[in-house]
Amino acid sequence: MLVLLRSPSVLQPVGALAASWPLIGTVLPVSPQAVPVPPGDAPFFTAPPTSVAPDPDAPTPADRAAGIQRRTVAQTGSGEFDVVPGSVPPPGRGEVHIVRVEVERGLPVDGERFAGFALATLNDDRSWGHDGAMTFARTDGDAEIVVVLASPDTSALLCDDRGSRGMLSCRNGPRVVLTFRRWVDATDEYADNVTAYRQYVVNHEVGHALGRGHERCPGPGRLAPAMQQQTLGLKGCAQNPWPYPADPPAPAP
Ligand SMILES: [Zn+2]
């Protein structure tokens, strides 16, 4: 009884297929098992390629270069910091600024890589040391500028930011506080270039530590100044992480 009931329901789709697709109506449907598999080839139907869903927590190469080991951002951190050990001499000319780098304990971050990214940004010729104006050394001792990477809640605490729950980075005294939330996710306007956002936020907050104030977008389509609050929106300007971009904006007509 059971077999008799099942047989028509198996055959029915085959007939329906032939009827609804007249061009191949005379072609017998081929069952998957009947497809010949050449010797040595992977059998297509019996071993389909396993599709692995992308892991949203896995870092991209750009993330890894910025020290990110996992993209998970926990709102709250330990509140304790590890100083990135070692020291790196200033690579350039001009006034030497000494930087210490700290990472909140428990963040999925490679401190050496994070410090390397921050110092490489600051020592880029498009940054504050343009044309030999200044150069940045790294230490694990006393420093003029302390670059801190912190969880959102700890960032908010260190920035005295009571509104955004750690969506904003800041400079507070000698501390340049970068929130891990933005370090990982950047902003919507920088979603296509998170590395540029990371360079921007280092340059911007260290710019404050060097005494620079905010600037406004100079006009639609122009490069956003490094001291523009780009995290709050580009305001019609184009992405630009650098105080001295290689291609300066064309002069206004
Ligand atoms: Zn600012």
Image: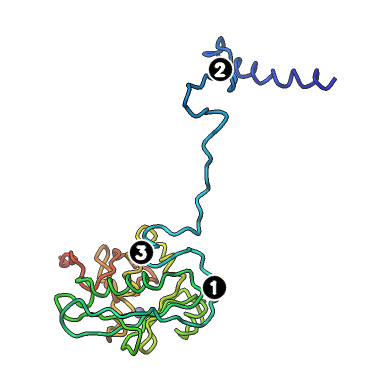
Residue at mark 1 to residue at mark 3: CA–CA distance: 23 Å
Nearer to us: label 2 or label 1: 1
Q: In the rendered structure, find residue 21 and report the number of the disc placed on it.
A: 2
Look at 32% across and 88% down and name the residue there: 143
**Residue drawn at point x = 42 percent, y = 76 percent:** 149
Q: Which residue is tagged 1?
A: 75
Label whose residue precedes the other's in the sequence (1 or 3):
3
Q: Residue furthest right?
A: 1
Picture layout, residue 236 above or below residue 149: above
Query: What residue is at 44 percent from the left and 80 percent from the top?
Result: 82
- Look at the numbered disc 3 and say if its residue's Cβ is closer than 8 Å to ligand 1: no
Closer to the camera in the image, 69 or 8: 69
> Mark 3 is on which residue type?
Ala
Earlier along the polypeptide chain: callout 3 or callout 2? Answer: 2
Q: Position of residue 181 (x, y in %)?
A: 47, 70
Separation of marks 2 and 1 at Cα, in angstroms: 56 Å
Report x, y in % for residue 152: 50, 75
Earlier sequence position, callout 2 versus callout 1 = 2
Residue at coordinates 47% horizontally, 78% vertically from top-left? Answer: 104
Left/right placement of residue 133 relative to residue 234 reads left
Q: Position of residue 145 (x, y in %)?
A: 33, 85
What is the secondary structure assignment of the residue under circle 2?
loop
Q: Where in the image, quadrant-wise, is ligand 1 located? A: bottom left
In the image shown, does 106 or 124 lie closer to the viewer?
Answer: 106
| Mark 3 burial class by Cα count in 10 Å: few <14, some 14-19, many 20+ | some
The residue lying toward the viewer, choosing from 238 and 103, is 103
Q: In terms of secondary structure, where does tag 3 sit?
A: helix
Relative to 65, say whether 243 is above or below.
below
